[in-house]
Amino acid sequence: MNRYGVFGNPIEHSLSPIIHTQFAQQTGCEIEYEKILAPLDDFAKIAQEFIDKGAKGFNITVPFKIEAFNLATQHSLNAQTAGAVNTIKINGNELMGENTDGIGLVNDLTKNLNIDLNNKTLLILGAGGATRGILLPLLKQQPRRLMIANRTASKAVDLAKDFSAYGKTCGFGLDKVKNDPVDVIINATSASLDGKMPDIASGVANGAICYDLMYGVQTPFMDWAKANNAKMIADGLGMLVEQAAAAFEFWTSKQPDTQAVIQNLRR
Ligand code: NDP
């Protein structure tokens, strides 16, 4: 039985054990997958104990993704550009760090929701850890333009500069969002957690695909999108399952059926 797990604080809410157990059943892999609450100041020690017990890999969620980056001995390009690791594969003495958040989002958008991002105008709200993690996989889809709007404008400007080598990016404050429609808006702020919607020009949503990274509830962003004539509205549950699938494949080389798991979770 191969051992895997997810580290976080808090961790009780995590759906990862349910998702990975379903992937394992589908693909005939024998795995054990547990939730591990790491103390805020002791992630590295708890992770090392898990590694010493013979674990094959683990996921890392809030707030340890940057510490996991520091723990990893090798980093994929996604992990390097994100500056954060959400998946570690243990290979002898090597801890291979990957970040599957962006791959998860792109797979949900392109495969599950059938959205072609090529040559489209994208607007991302927020410039925190999640935005940094999704930028490279989004830019690999070759959008016409990717705009980042953030409450603290300087963070959006800096992030856009950091990724300008990978595609046409620009960053600005939320107040600079124009009233003109874009193709896709991705809410990567944590405002939904506080029941808030960033204050932006409403015309930008007219006919747009609006995607909230948050999942499990109807968010103020989703309400705002509906009120402003969005073409399609989605939450981040598909991204959650797809990022888990990319981690599962990284560990086992097996590709699970994500649609079945998304449907089970929605039920
Ligand atoms: P961070 O704390 O790193 O960043 C938060 C961002 O939200 C910042 O840009 C911040 O702006 C902005 N923000 C916070 N409150 C407000 C507000 N009231 N109005 C406008 N902007 C606001 O968080 P993460 O990037 O890690 O996470 C963002 C969201 O993505 C969370 O809801 C998280 O749950 C979700 N997520 C979902 C995943 C999935 O699999 N579906 C995976 C990863 C994340 P400022 O810089 O000005 O402070």
Image: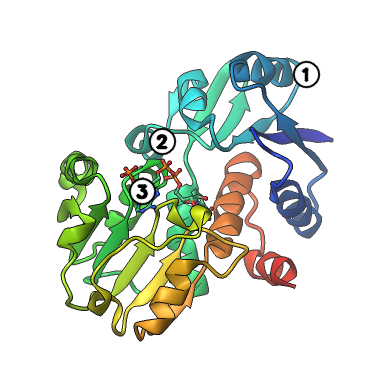
Q: Which residue is mark 1?
A: 53
Please tell me which of labels 2 and 1 falls first in the chain: 1
> For the residues marked 2 and 1, what is the alpha-carbon distance in whole angstroms?
25 Å
Q: Earlier in the sequence, mark 1 or mark 3?
A: 1
Mark 3 lies on residue: 131
Above-or-below relation of 139 to 5? below
Image quadrant occupied by the N terminus: top right
Q: Position of residue 90 (x, y in %)?
A: 62, 26
Q: Are marks 3 and 2 in contact (CB under 8 Å)?
A: no
As drawn, is 152 to the left or to the right of 249? left
Residue at 60% x, 22% y: name it. 40
- Kindly indicate whether the residue at mark 1 contacts the one at mark 2 (C-beta within 8 angstroms): no
Residue 185 drawn at (x, y percent): 33, 68
Amino acid type, label 2: Ala
Q: Badge 2: how crowded within 10 Å, few (<14), some, or many (20+)? A: many
User: What is the crowding at mark 1: few (fewer than 14 residues within 10 Å), some, or many (at least 20)?
Assistant: few
Is residue 51 visible from the viewing direction of this image?
yes
Q: Nearer the viewer, residue 197 or 186?
A: 197
Drawn side of residue 51 relative to residue 146, left or right: right
**Which dot marks residue 79?**
2
Q: Position of residue 79 (x, y in %)?
A: 41, 35
* SS under mark 2: helix
Query: In this rendering, would 7 be left or right of 234?
Result: right
Q: Quadrant of residue 179?
A: bottom left
Instruction: Specify whether residue 115 is in view.
Output: no
Q: In which quadrant of the rendered image does the C terminus lie?
A: bottom right
Q: Is residue 78 above or below residue 234?
A: above
Q: Residues within 10 Å of mark 3 (few under 14, many from 20)?
A: many
Position of residue 143 in the picture relative to residue 130 (left or right):
left
At numbered mark 1, what does the secondary structure look like: helix, strand or loop? loop
